Amino acid sequence: MALKKVGILTGGGDCSGLNAVIRAVTRAAAIEHGAKVLGIEGGFEGLITAHTQELTVRNTRDILTLGGTILGTTNKGNPFEFREIKPDGSIGVHDYSDRAVDNFNKMGLDCLFVVGGEGTLEIGYRFFLKGVPVIGIPKTIDNDLDKTDYTFGYQTAVEVACDAMDRLQTTGRSHQRVMILEVMGRTAGWIAIDAGVAGGAHIILIPEIPFNIDRVVEKIKFRAEGGSPFSIIMVAEGAKEEGGDVITQASASTRLQGVPQLGGVGFYLADQIKKRIDLEVRCTVLGHIQRGGSPCAFDRVLGTRLGSHAVRAAAEGSFGTMVALKTPDMTLVPLKELAGKVRSVPVDSQLIQCAESIGISMGR
């Protein structure tokens, strides 16, 4: 089909590589099809409010290396369940999806490119069912989207975490301390396991394998008795103790998201270790440092490939799909196959076997 005008939005948490996708979609649509590109600001909220900006080859030429997203994003703007604070302080939930569809039609768009993770793509699929021609582009630093080998933003996050671990190695060894690094990963521990292996962690704790604190301490004692009185622990924010729950933060800022904000497992772990062994323990929470900054080369290339392939899929009329990396090729996956699915680290995977075979404790 002929593409005359397309729209693109970025939803959910930001990550490195988003602007590479925006640039690729803009250039492929304009250069190959002569189409106009409309950037929808603030994720799906931009569809509700009709806040947009025109994207051109010229005004996107220098954004490849930029972190974040020039369109802005939000993870609390689901038009189907839009949450707002009422004057009395309570939360009201409204369905603004029809308004969003009406604005899409008024914009005269032939396609809506939805860039995001599992939650954002699920919303995109719901709009597809309402008649909006949607193409999904996978994005998440957690790498927990099904049907694609990698999501852009992930490799940059791993490199940031690995660099932090390298630095903790030197200070931990100098002071003979137990150093804990808490990284992102609500339900999937891909960042923790990859960065942990790459950074030489001695203990890696992930959401998929509930940890036993005694096993953790045993590993630390084993190293100390062997002449290495320092240990490096990598822990994902969603990791939990056997029989316990994930640790959440009480924060008013999460009320509009409707999901708890995780964090604190690193400090919990530090307190538990201090009670059991006479060593200094320090915890570092990497937090949003993993999301910001310039994307690595892998994510620049992947974002560019995904954006370009998404435009081709739109030109072919392959709506209701997500572009995906199936190394070395790009492919299309029906959005309905992704709804509600999160890809976790298989506990019997070769990656876990590799870690344990070289002496890394998984806390079990």
Image (cartoon, grey):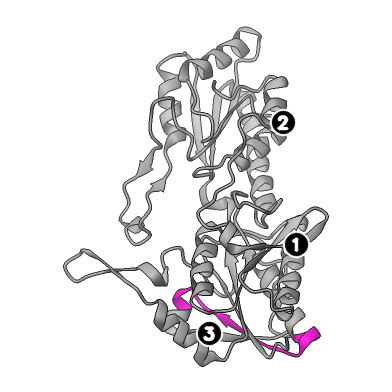
| Span highlighted in magenta in the image | 30-46
Under mark 3, the amino acid is Thr
Q: Closer to the observer: label 1 or label 3?
A: 1
Classify 155 as above or below 139: above
Is 34 inside the magenta-drawn segment?
yes
Label 2: element kind: helix
Are the residues flagged by discs 3 and 2 in contact, CB closer than 8 Å? no
Write the residue at 75% across / 60% down: 302
Q: Residues within 10 Å of mark 2 (few under 14, many from 20)?
A: few
Classify 219 as above or below 23: above
Write the residue at 56% across / 16% down: 220
Number of residue marks:
3
Under mark 1, the amino acid is Thr
The residues bearing labels 3 and 2 have C-alpha atoms spaced at a distance of: 46 Å
Of callouts 3 and 2, the N-terminal one: 3
Residue 64 vs residue 105, the one in the foreground: 105
Position of 81 with respect to 281 (left or right) is left
Mark identifier at residue 331: 1
Residue furthest toward the top?
225
Residue furthest toward the right?
328
Residue 37 vs residue 282, the one in the foreground: 37
Query: Circle 2 is placed at which residue position?
Result: 350
Query: Circle 3 is placed at which residue position?
Result: 52
Label 3: element kind: strand
Question: Residue 329: where, in percent of width, then height?
Answer: 81, 59
Under mark 2, the amino acid is Gln
Of callouts 1 and 2, the N-terminal one: 1
The quadrant in which residue 137 appears is bottom right
Question: Residue 199: where, in percent of width, then height?
Answer: 69, 34
Label 1: element kind: strand
Question: Residue 270: where, in percent of width, then height?
Answer: 45, 27
